[in-house]
């Protein structure tokens, strides 16, 4: 955003030592990128996530197999046959094929749900924080109401009532997780709307709509981007939980479904539940490493904590 | 604390509950299909007479607002409807299950706060020390592990490798005629794994939060004064600093309650814990809507009460808020 009204995100923060000597006027985004690049855990998370996404997108080209097909004896341990490196589940279905195809729905639902969460949360939070007064009051009571509903239970009810498909699941997760984003957006708007460049924008005749979306929102983005990253992680865990309970789309293989399907046989074979769980863990772990890295990059002041 | 504030808070809680009831009502009607059919459930194999009696009971032939009034009236009298699968009033089904859930949730909450805060305070002694590193790594890992999977892994570990804790249910059948103490110990024994599984996620978050909160407080002037007076490290950490650092922890603990109930739902399913989560899961599989809606209502009520209690304890803990 090359708006003259934009200020660096790190305003008020103490510049790093090397920034003092080499400081050039930089856009907040490229400054954040410089910080992110030097953060080893965040880079590791990025690489890890890239590998997982590539494996779910293209893994099936290298390793063929239908995760629903019964191809071998049940409960073949991992490594016992070269054909099925991760072994087979209680029906004799190929686990590696399940892991490779099962990531698709999990990641897609996670991303879609996070997008829906951000859309609802940012819109309501922005209106609430900007207009204040009765709008704020009404929207915040609405938000509090949604925070009272236990999210997973409410999502389960929604999915059951409106038949489980990937879209219903994504919408259900979005509908239950937006309140925190709304509160965060509202807090940022309350803070930013008092700043001078907003008054300046108003003085040159900008209307409310323009001030909300092109003056305040871009400057409220850094914490919202961090929160969006964490939301993806939470949404992935949600999807996994719903599929584990058997409330996912039954025609699509997913990591949560693999764990749920095999859970009655965990004492006979550990591997059919262990590998999909590790896949979920590493996905969410990589996403949260990226989130922490972004947080540090946008708020250098908070790094010591 | 003045009583008008308390009354206002309770009134607000009741309004929230009314909203949950209205939401339940709307959900049943927004769902595709005949509401009577939805209420009877697909597994119920509802006959035409049953459907007729449901229409009668819920007043489905009457205008929508009248229907809503009937529904709200029923809930206010404690009548959450009839479960067609269990063939019992929903209210009594929930009454049987609510105890185990509250036990699980509260024990997990206490475990996670106590262990989390101790870890966080110890980490705050040295912001770049080993303990601090452990807390941040542990918090990131704890956040990323699916809670049901932790449970399954613990079951595998404790069922086959280290059989010291029971991995299923809440009570041993063989102790049915035992005395109350033996029974209580038995339940505590069964509680270890589910409570710990549920506590792990939040424990990590409390550890990270209390570390950050402590670091902020430890930089303030009155801590320097306390040290200058010669107060011991332990007294500074746990007496002077923790009291002020505890406020954000209390806020988060209140907000976490809803998530804790969601988590309990998965944990109960994994460990066969006979609580409301297990009931919700069973009734969702059977499409037993009156039970599902009853559980949603009751779980939300628990969150409302928890929020109210947090709010009140916050006022007790922070003298600045008293009388406002």
Image (cartoon, rainbow, N blue to C red):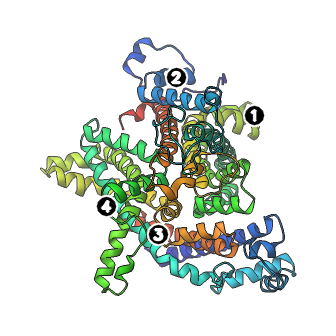
Residue bearing the label numbered 3: B273
In this rendering, do the residues under marks 4 and 1 share a single chain? no
Q: Residue B166: horizontal and vertical position, in percent?
A: 36, 66
Tag 2 near tag 4, CB within 8 Å = no
Which of the marked residues, 4 or 3, is nearer the chain's N terminus?
4
At 35% from the left and 80% from the top, the residue drawn is: B174
- Determine crowd level at label 2: few under 14, some 14-19, many 20+ residues with C-alpha closer than 10 A: some
Q: Give me the C-alpha separation between circle 4 and circle 3.
A: 18 Å
Figure check: B126 above or below B105: above
Which-is-in-front pick, marks 2 and 4?
A: 4
Which-is-in-front pick, marks 4 and 3?
A: 4
The secondary element bearing badge 1 is classed as loop
Quadrant for residue A255, please give it: top right
Give the quarter of the figure containing the N terminus of chain A: top right
Q: Residue B259: horizontal and vertical position, in percent?
A: 51, 59
Which-is-in-front pick, marks 3 and 1?
A: 3
Figure check: B126 above or below A15: below
Which of the marked residues, 2 or 1, is nearer the chain's N terminus?
2
Q: Give me the C-alpha separation between circle 3 and circle 1.
A: 59 Å
Q: Which residue ends up furthest to the left in the rendered image?
A: B230
Residue bearing the label numbered 2: A33
Give the quarter of the figure containing the C terminus of chain A: top left
At 46% from the left and 77% from the top, the residue drawn is: B99
The secondary element bearing badge 2 is classed as helix
Q: Chain of mark 1?
A: A
Query: What count of labels does the image hold?
Result: 4
Tag 2 near tag 1, CB within 8 Å = no
Q: Give me the C-alpha separation between circle 2 and circle 1.
A: 31 Å
In this rendering, do the residues under marks 2 and 4 share a single chain? no
Quadrant for residue A162, please give it: bottom right
Q: Residue B163 has which mark?
A: 4
């Amino acid at each position: 955003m090359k708006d003259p009204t934009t200020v660096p995100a790190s305003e008020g923060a103490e510049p790093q030592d090397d920034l003092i000597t080499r400081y050039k006027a930089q856009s907040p985004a490229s400054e954040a990128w410089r910080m992110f690049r030097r953060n080893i855990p965040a880079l590791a998370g990025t690489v890890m996530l890239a590998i997982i996404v590539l494996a779910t997108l293209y893994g099936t080209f290298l390793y063929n197999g239908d995760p629903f097909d019964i191809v071998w004896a049940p409960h073949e341990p991992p490594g016992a046959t070269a054909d099925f490196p991760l072994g087979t589940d209680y029906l004799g279905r190929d686990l590696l094929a399940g892991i490779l195809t099962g990531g698709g729905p999990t990641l897609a639902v996670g991303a879609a749900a996070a997008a829906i969460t951000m859309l609802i949360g940012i819109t309501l939070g922005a209106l609430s924080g900007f207009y204040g007064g009765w709008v704020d009051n009404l929207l915040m009571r609405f938000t509090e109401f949604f925070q009272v509903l236990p999210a997973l239970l409410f999502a389960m009810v929604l999915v059951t009532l409106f038949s489980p498909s990937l879209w219903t699941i994504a919408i259900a997760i979005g509908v239950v997780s937006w309140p925190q984003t709304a509160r965060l957006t509202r807090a940022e708007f309350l803070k930013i709307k008092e700043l001078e460049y907003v008054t300046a924008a108003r003085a040159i005749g900008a209307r409310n709509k323009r001030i909300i979306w092109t003056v305040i929102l871009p400057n409220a983005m850094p914490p919202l981007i961090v929160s969006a990253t964490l939301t993806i992680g939470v949404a992935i865990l949600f999807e996994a939980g719903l599929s584990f309970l058997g409330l996912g789309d039954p025609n699509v293989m997913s990591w949560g479904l693999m764990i749920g399907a095999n859970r009655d046989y965990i004492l006979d074979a550990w591997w059919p539940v262990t590998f999909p769980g590790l896949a979920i863990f590493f996905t969410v772990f990589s996403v949260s490493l990226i989130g922490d890295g972004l947080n540090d990059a946008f708020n250098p002041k908070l790094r010591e904590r | 604390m003045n009583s008008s504030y308390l009354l206002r808070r309770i009134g607000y809680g009741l309004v929230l509950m009314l909203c949950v009831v209205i939401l339940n009502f709307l959900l049943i009607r927004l769902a595709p299909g005949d509401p009577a059919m939805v209420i009877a459930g697909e597994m119920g194999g509802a006959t035409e007479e049953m459907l007729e009696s449901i229409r009668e009971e819920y007043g489905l032939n009457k205008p929508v607002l009248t229907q809503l009034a009937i529904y709200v009236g029923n809930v206010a009298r404690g009548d959450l409807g009839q479960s067609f699968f269990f063939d019992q009033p929903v209210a009594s089904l929930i009454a049987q299950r609510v105890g185990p859930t509250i036990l699980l949730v509260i024990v997990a909450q206490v475990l996670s706060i106590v262990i989390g805060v101790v870890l966080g305070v110890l980490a705050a002694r040295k912001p770049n020390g080993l303990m601090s590193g452990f807390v941040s790594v542990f918090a990131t890992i704890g956040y990323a592990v699916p809670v049901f999977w932790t449970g399954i892994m613990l079951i595998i570990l404790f069922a086959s490798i280290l059989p010291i804790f029971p991995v299923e249910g809440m009570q041993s059948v063989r102790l049915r005629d035992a005395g109350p103490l033996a029974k209580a110990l038995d339940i505590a024994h069964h509680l270890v794994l589910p409570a710990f599984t549920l506590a792990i996620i939040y424990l990590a978050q409390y550890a990270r939060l209390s570390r950050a909160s402590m670091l902020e407080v430890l930089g303030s002037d009155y801590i320097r004064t306390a040290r200058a007076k010669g107060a011991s490290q332990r007294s500074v950490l746990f007496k002077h600093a923790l009291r002020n650092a505890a406020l954000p922890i209390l806020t988060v603990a209140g907000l976490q309650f809803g998530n804790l109930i969601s988590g309990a739902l998965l944990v109960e399913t994994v460990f066969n814990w006979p609580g409301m989560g297990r009931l919700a899961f069973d009734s969702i599989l059977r499409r037993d809507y009156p039970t599902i809606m009853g559980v949603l209502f009751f779980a939300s009520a628990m969150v409302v009460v928890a929020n109210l209690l947090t709010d009140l304890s916050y006022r007790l803990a922070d003298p600045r808020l008293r009388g406002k």
